[in-house]
Image (spheres, rainbow, N blue to C red):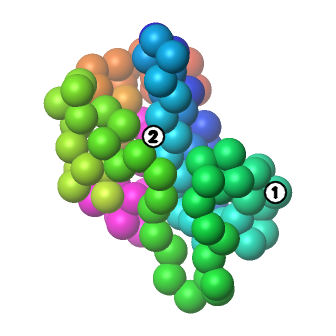
Amino acid sequence: GALALIAIDEEFFMLMRVVGTQISLFLSDATCALDYEVAEEFLEIADLSMPEDDDESFPVGNLDIFSDLGMNQMEIEAICADEELFPDEQLEAIASRLGFGDQFAELLGL
């Protein structure tokens, strides 16, 4: 399968995973679709509704995207809720939890 971990500016991140013919999508903050076309398109592709306002951020998509790899929904939600971390740091935390954190950090020069 293939995996994409994408940080957009310093605002949010997207996860995409392909396993066979199954595509899983995750967006760390649905409210970013109000300001970012790529996030809006993500919601359209995932057949998810646009948020009404940007008062409170919330993740959307397949929260169990990595459950078969040992990372559950609560862990991903906790990383998304950590306001101390920038999106690239959140992705590094996910990569570390999945076992390729060193390679991810090296690739990004973190």
Q: What secondary structure is marked by label 2?
A: helix
Magenta segment's dominant SS is helix
Q: Earlier in the sequence, mark 2 or mark 1?
A: 1
Residue 12 visible, this orientation: no
For mark 2, does the 10 Å Cα neighbourhood hold few (<14), some (14 to 19), or many (20 or more) residues? many
For mark 1, does the 10 Å Cα neighbourhood hold few (<14), some (14 to 19), or many (20 or more) residues? few
Residue 105 visible, this orientation: yes
Which one is in front, 109 or 5? Answer: 5
Residue extending furthest left? Answer: 70
Q: Is residue 8 left or right of residue 16?
A: right
Q: Residue at x 45, y 61 (%)?
A: 59
Identify residue for label 1: 37
| Residue 65, image quadrant | top left
Q: Residue at x 60, y 48 (%)?
A: 46
Question: What span is colored magenta in the figure?
Answer: 78-92
Q: CA distance from mark 2 to mark 1?
A: 21 Å
Identify residue for label 2: 91
